[in-house]
Image (cartoon, grey):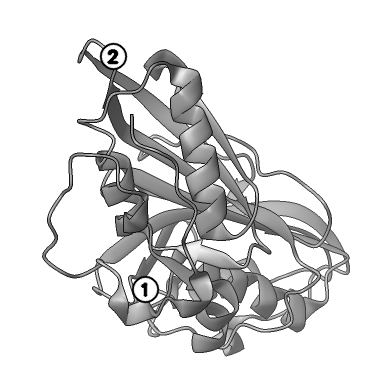
């Protein structure tokens, strides 16, 4: 069995040196060096996200394609849940995670507990923070598909002209003095900052405080359609924009992104200590 490794150095990793957007070989034996960390603070700075030291939340990863060999050479399959604190030193490029997980496919391990131990050590080293990893049977991979709770904005008849992030679209609803609500849209799209591939998502905004114009919020979220950033910083940008525009007493932003390469990443940010609800949407 291959040994564990934790040599990843997120401070030394550059955005343009990872496998994303490049033709890549797929190693079939365990290779932890495939993980490509990137400094989280640098990723935030690159898109202008700041003042997030007090933000709570996590990035929830789900891996649907994971397999290894038992000691008899018989394949085992499982799903993975990974939870990464939003204040971890590093984020890890998603394609490098896919390559890393695929590298288990022709490697023999004595039992599932050993596989989990290796995953926990490698991923925690790459993210430079403790990563909670669950190794799941396929029947337990995700709950039954469901819809997000909250008022869906998608039926609003809005006229849209802006497809680059525009905070000026955010306005107060003058017909109300206070709001405590959860708003949902499935119309969200942004772009990968490396490949420009589309990243589709459902977004949940929960808040209490100064009422937001529903039309303005929907147009603002649609304005990300050609915005290029990683999932994590995209959700943080939305969080910061709404926080700065409305100063809500409580605020949560949750992005449920569709999978690419057998992985989905679902960032959750909050103004208070809270855990993201675990769910699976029909598109996921």
Q: Is residue 265 visible?
A: yes
Q: Pick whichever, 197 or 146, lies toward us.
A: 197
Q: Pick whichever, 187 or 145, lies toward us.
A: 145
Specify whether 56 is left or right of 120: right
Q: Is residue 252 visible?
A: no
Residue at image point 33% right, 71% down: 191
- Cβ–Cβ below 8 Å for labels 2 and 1? no
Q: Which mark is residue 200?
A: none
184 is higher (above) or lower (below) than 194: above
The C terminus sits in image quarter: top left
Residue at image point 35% right, 40% down: 283
How many numbered markers are drawn? 2
Residue 278 appears in which quarter of the rendering? top right
Residue receiving disc 1: 225
Q: Residue 276: percent from the left, percent from the top?
A: 66, 44
110 is higher (above) or lower (below) than 244: above
Name the residue at the top extreme. Answer: 72
Residue at image point 64% right, 62% down: 88
Q: Residue 228: percent from the left, percent from the top?
A: 37, 78
134 is higher (above) or lower (below) than 76: below
Q: Pick whichever, 144 or 138, lies toward us.
A: 138
Label 1: few (<14), some (14–19) or many (≥20) C-alpha neighbours in 10 Å: many
Q: Secondary structure at mark 2?
A: loop
Q: Secondary structure at mark 1?
A: loop
Q: Residues under labels 2 and 1: Cα distance?
A: 48 Å
Mark 2 or 1, nearer chain start: 2
Specify whether 107 is left or right of 150: left
Q: Pick whichever, 82 or 216, lies toward us.
A: 82
Residue receiving disc 2: 71
Q: Residue 79: percent from the left, percent from the top?
A: 40, 28
Q: Residue 144: percent from the left, percent from the top?
A: 47, 21
């Amino acid at each position: 069995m291959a040994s564990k490794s934790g040599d990843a150095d997120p401070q030394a990793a550059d955005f343009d040196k990872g496998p994303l957007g490049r033709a890549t070989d797929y190693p079939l034996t365990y290779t932890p060096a495939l993980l490509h960390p990137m400094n989280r603070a640098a990723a935030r700075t690159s898109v202008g996200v700041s003042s997030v030291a007090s933000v709570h939340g996590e990035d929830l990863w789900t891996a649907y394609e994971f397999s290894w060999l038992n000691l008899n050479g018989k394949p085992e399959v499982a799903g993975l849940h990974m939870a990464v604190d939003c204040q971890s030193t590093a984020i890890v490029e998603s394609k490098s995670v896919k390559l890393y997980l695929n590298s288990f496919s022709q490697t023999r391990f004595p039992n599932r507990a050993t596989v989990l131990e290796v995953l926990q050590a490698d991923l925690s080293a790459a993210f430079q923070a403790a990563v909670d990893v669950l190794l799941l049977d396929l029947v337990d991979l995700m709950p039954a598909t469901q819809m997000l709770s909250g008022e869906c904005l998608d039926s609003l008849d809005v006229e849209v002209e802006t497809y680059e992030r525009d905070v000026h679209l955010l306005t107060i609803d003058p017909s109300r003095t206070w709001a405590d609500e959860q708003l949902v849209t499935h119309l969200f799209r942004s772009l990968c900052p490396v490949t420009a591939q589309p990243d589709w998502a459902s977004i949940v905004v929960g808040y209490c405080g100064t009422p937001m114009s529903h039309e303005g919020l929907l147009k603002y979220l649609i304005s990300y359609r050609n915005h290029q950033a990683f999932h994590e910083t995209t959700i943080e940008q939305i969080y910061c924009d709404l926080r700065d525009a409305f100063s809500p007493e409580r605020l949560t932003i949750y992005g449920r992104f569709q999978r690419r390469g057998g992985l989905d990443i679902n960032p959750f940010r909050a103004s208070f200590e809270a855990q993201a609800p675990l769910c699976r949407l029909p598109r996921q």
